[in-house]
Amino acid sequence: MKKKLLLFWALALGLIGPALAQRNLTGRVTAAEDGAPLPGVSILLKGTTTGTVTDVNGDFRLRLPTNEGGTLVFSYVGYVTQELALGAQTVINLSLATDTKTLREVVVTSLGIEREKEALGYAVQSVKGEDLTLAREVNIINSLQGRVPGMQLSQAATGAGGSTRIVLRGANSLAGTDNNALIVIDGVPMDNTNNRTPGRFGGIDYGTGASLINPDDVERIDVLTGPNAAALYGERAAAGVIMITTKKGTQKQGIGVQYNANATFETPLILPDFQNEYGQGVGGQLPTSTDGTLNIPRNIESSWGPRMTGQSVRDWTGQVRPYEAQPDNIRDFFRTGQTYNNNLSLNAGGEKATFRFSLGSMNNRGIMPNSSLDRLNFLARGTAQITKKLSVDAKANYIRQSSFNRPNLTDNPDNPMYGFIYMPRSIRLDDLRTFEDANGNPVTWAATGVDPNNGFPTSRRQNPFWSIYKNTNEDLMNRIIAFASIKYEFTDWLNLQLRAGTDYYNHRMEERTATRTLFESSRDRAKYVITNHNVVETNADVLLSFRKKFGDDLTVSASGGGNIRLSKFEEVGAQTAGLNVPNLFTIANGAAPVPLYGISERQTNSLYASGQVGYKDYLYLDVSARNDWASTLPRGNWSYFYPAASLSFVLTDAIKLDQKVLSYGKLRASIAQVGGAAQPYQLALNYGLGLPHANQGTGAIRTQLPNVDLKPQITQAIELGADLRFVNDRFGLDVTWYKKNTFNQIFTPPISATSGFTSTVINAGNVQNQGWEVALRLTPLQLESGLKWDVQVNYTRNRSKIVSTGAGINNFFIGNDRNVTVAASPDRPFGDFRGRGFQRDPEGRIVVDAQGLPLIATQDVVIGNYLPLWQGGLNNIITWKGFRANVLVDMRMGGDILSLSNIFASENGNAAATLAGRAEWYAGTGGILVDGVVANADGSFTPNTRFVDPEAYWRRISTQNGAVAEAFVYSGTFIKLRELTFGYTFNKTQLKRLPFTALGVSIVGRNLALLLNNLPGFDPDVSSYNTGNVQGIESTAFPSTRSFGLNLTATF
Amino acid sequence: MIACTSNFEEMNTDPRATTSISPDLLFTGALRSGTLNWDLYQIGQNLHADFYCQYFANNAPGFQTDRLETNPGWLATFWNNYYSNFIINTQEAIRLASPDPRAVNKVAQARIWRAWLFHRLTDYWGDVPYSQAGQGVNGSQTPEYDTQESIYRDMIEELREAAAQLDPTQPARYGAADILYNDNLERWRRFANSLRLRLALRMSNADPAAAQTEVRALMTENRFLASNADNAQMVTFTTGQFINRNPLAILFNFNEFRVSKTMVDLLTELNDPRLPVYAAPVPNSNPPRYAGLPNGLNAVQLGQPANARENFSQPGPPIRAEGAPIPVLMFDEVCFLQAEAVQRGWGTGDARALYEAGIRANFQRRGLTDAQATAYLAQPSVQYNGTIERIITQKWIALYPNGFEGWAELRRTGFPALQPWANPGETNGLMPARVRYPPSEQSLNQANYEAAVARQGPDLPTTRLWWARR
């Protein structure tokens, strides 16, 4: 079978040229199940090298050297091979039946090498292009959600162009810079770093490289979850690799044209859980003004007022109107988002060359008004067989993405959600639509101060419409991802490949804060930042491959080569606090311009080798080794070596077993090590230059103590797995157990600032991840009528443990936000939340003060951890004739979330939870009775009996910076209806009178419902920050969206 | 080819930084950063000392320090910057200038600056790392804490030595990089002596004998700041970056604090013409009305309409002006220090004249006339009456808005009487005696932290500092 596949590729590449022919055969090969044409079927005259492959329509044309009979062998991956004895016919139409046991599945592994899955001693998960394009996620990575065991995705709810954190088998590294999986496209790594990460006080998520990939160009994605699979990619493979293979042209007649159109519509999936009974005010009351009208003082920024019953009040606009709840004042702000995708591809190929050209456009108008994201993808790919021995393969992908007004994140008045969290429940959204008054000042419901310099109003409570119409941002990305490779086949068992690939982009970003913006602190309350990122990741590699069969039983393959990786990031820009001419956004107009410059550059040279010995097609041993030379480590330590080995044993090929019981069985084991280098510029004691004062330059020593003796960090991993299929493959189980430790971590722990430095860079620590990945494949139903129901279950269970954080470091600080620190501590899982709890008596009861209000503990304790216990996905695929329906549900069990929005909204009485006890308190019949105890003078405790004002209670436990964080930690457990698709593919008969060779339509729904959620008002599945190690904190999060779409694919 | 590493070291050299630097750049940086950029001015000074001495009161409901609760994060940031920026860069300037005997003034000026920096630090916390501080490169990453007593003794010694070291004949000078005194060595000498006088008097209760000896020597030498022209103050500008501007001008925009009731009430009671300088009228009040905000209000109280921001006075325009200088040590304070020295019998002179000179000098720098000062001084409630209370009360008014010194002198002398805090906080409603160490010290420098706490007393805001013992 393997031979056959090799031959197939040989044929596909046109290695075997036409011979003198005496007989012409034509025909078409179709799939038995639905009559669809099968392109790429290998057809071979048995015992010879004469053959061909079918084109995109399933058609073939074959010249036979003689008129004599013989046997034609039709083979195709995934289908049962058929042999056909030749008679006198010249036309052959044949249908191939699906091979339910697709044993010889080919997967893409390190360096883009295609390998048969059965020979691999480690886990690889593959997702095919159709699953990805059907989902119609703008960011293709998001369509992997729920489909790959071992993978944890955290999506930032920042619209179509947002980033996604991809963690495979748990976070390895305390440093947080290298826990994201490496993305490799067609064997060449791409830059997927998030160059500008939002922090706790706002910022914009500009997305990462992966979000730019055109899903229509993707053939398949193979996820190498463990470092075992990826030792050959070096340090970045320690976090796992996502291998993306793009489409190539196929050998066919004429030009194939495929058009794909898609429209999706988005609405908010979940909005804050706010009460609608009490309005703006304090103490349950509103003051009466001199004219007898109830008055709402503008300085009151909370919903602790009286019950809204439509009573007449004078509000912030000066009008006397009914005091009424505005239940939809957040929902009405958003619009229905729209995304349109159009993709046209041309596909041509002859015996000597193939070509594919694809033009994709994506136009998105997100749910936030006044925002857009437009992407153009242009891809050309060609392969050519120059001589019998020399072939070339080259690709150029140009991407242009322009975006206007990406949402601002977290605790920042430019984040509209921040505005809504603080906006009292009686504020009418329509009153705010005019966001600028006649004097050019912002309109806001809140009280404003006055800037003495110019009389401009000031406040932190900005009108959300000002946020999105005046304080805009804009960015433009021009990117080229390209590679070229040549391959020379010395013999059929030895070849040499040279390849160079680059991922280059320029990303220009502008952020504008309009003149007279309430919260900005420059003199004219304007700000402007423009930055340009120039980033390049270039890889050049050489690979010599050998493959030969010795005797009947032994196959040996080996390859060796080297790689040079150059990676450079450069930021050039400027910013100014204040503008001379109002709202003229150019640096030349800056009142106080400052240049911005950043750089990071590194090089890694590598040599590597790998070898495989296969015995009788059922036992395979793989070994690999790599040596890196990394520029970021000191001389003497910059060269480091690491090996890997794996073993695969196909049980069912070794021992003949009853197919009806165990139709396939494979056991695998693997062990690997991966070395890692440091970030640039950590070795020398440096002085940086600061802004001048009084025309004098300033300098300062860097606050990180360098380490002249930095060593590489090491990840060691072992994994054991089994791939078992039963009852003629009706039921399959793929299980992997793994354990992975990262030692000698290079990270920058804090040191006492009294040393003169706030941190140092060291080698220390050991983070362990251990877990299970389970993929279950089941076909509960398969009928003669063609009705088939497939179930795929994915399960991920990762247990993280900080074995050590290094001597003297008990709580390694990962990040913080208001009221919480994210930390790593020995013997704890990664990502503890530390914050304030209630003060408790020795029995654990909450201690209240004399008034009955809870007391707050004075020391931070662990109040949660963001890592989930397990995650799972359940995918149902039902096919019948041309119909295909898909229901994907995924879930997460555990993983805490600290909700800052709920803290803020509890303090100001917006949160639904703050309703309890209000009516009773205002009526004098009750309030909140804290279930706790009062401390007596003698040290004993008696149960609390004092009711308190709910306003006093919530203000006690939810102050902005001094909250009882413990009370706002929620379980992140959720169940989500992730994807629902229903499609129909027309068959050949139906298409006869139509100009199409293939036609499919489908409707798609994504993120349709949170079937289970414990987090009030927010989606536990999205991240407020993005790709860093600070996860599990919800901070005025932008709503996630549900989407519905219509999809059309036509091939001409 | 693959193993070619010849370009690695060059590639891994940060092009934005230098491994060798002039001490001038570090000294200029330490002068400016040590007088606090707006962010550290806010979390270091404004949200602590300025509230604790009741110059200002807080009206941001989410901020807890004015209601006498600790915000460990703010303190940690202030502490971290103090050591890893102000102090180490001053020490680096000393280290880099030391080998050149012609640069002796650079060393001396940086030593004086280092003492100024450290006295503010120890006045906040008490025992702090001093003799082993800032030696992470070749020394300890976990420095021992020195007692406040030994720090004070050493700072006084440093100031004495550094002042003596100043030598106008030596040519290698900071020149314009000296953004405090623009290369005026005589003023540096007077600044050093004036600071020494401040430090010596700070020890008046803790070690009266040593304080007296030191004060006497200084009074005899009598080489202090001699006029407002000698004022040690950091110049700021109306243009440029935030770092170039008056921090209070920026903080004022945040709308998060008001002038305290204590200050407004006292100035009103004394008919003090500085009231319109120190405070702005309540918005829309006609005639202009001044109202101070009580200290210590909690979030619920601040939510009450009566406590609305609009009802209270902002800092006055001259105080919050963008180009207003940041006080370091002013001539008027030196007059009050000398008056106290004479009043204690620790030097010769006319205490009344010195006291009045302090008030006149302060009026002058506030833009008021000498006639106004004369009229003010004629009031029985202002006239010199031979008490420490009168001197310190007027000094407290004069120092505004320098909360570091206002709070320190309140802790030493108990004057002036403050108004009660509205909430008990962590100090039972009393003025804090110090601030807590940042939590990071408990984990990153544990043994030395614990030794300091064992020696000094519990790490609480109520534990008195060495010099505040009475």
Image: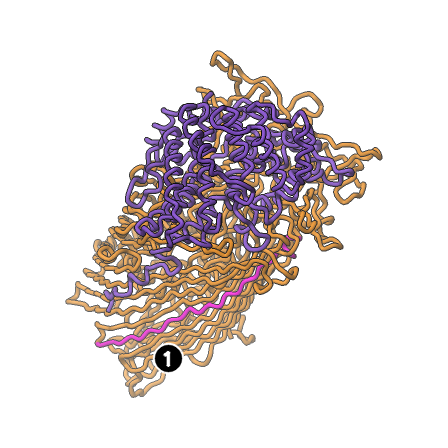
Chain colours: A orange, B purple
Q: Residue at x 31, y 52 (%)?
A: B100
Q: Where is residue B454 shown, x and y percent of the image? A: 36, 24
Q: Residue at x 31, y 57 (%)?
A: A632
Quadrant in the picture for the N terminus of chain A = bottom left
How would you classify the magenta stretch by its main secondary structure? strand
Residue A296 lies, with reference to residue A195, above or below; the image says above
Q: Is residue B194 left or right of residue A922?
A: left
Q: Nearer the viewer, residue A544 or A428?
A: A428
The chain letter under disc 1 is A
Task: Find residue A338 and report its image quarter.
Answer: bottom right
User: Which residue is at the far left?
Assistant: A551
User: Which residue is at the far right?
Assistant: A291
For residue A475: magenta? yes
From the image, tell me which residue sits under label 1: A353
Residue B45 lies, with reference to residue A334, above or below; the image says above
Q: Residue at x 58, y 43 (%)?
A: B248
Task: Find residue A631 and report its image quarter.
Answer: bottom left
Q: Where is residue B466 shown, x and y percent of the image? A: 42, 25
Q: Where is residue A644 shown, x and y percent of the image? A: 23, 55
Residue type marked 1? Ala
Q: Where is residue B299 shown, x and y percent of the image? A: 61, 32
For residue B66: magenta? no
Magenta span of residues: A466-490
Q: Nearer the viewer, residue A710 or B394?
A: B394
Q: Nearer the viewer, residue A1006 or A833?
A: A833
Mark 1: which secondary structure?
strand
Assess disc 1: are there few (<14), some (14-19) or many (≥20) residues with their C-alpha within 10 Å of its C-alpha.
many
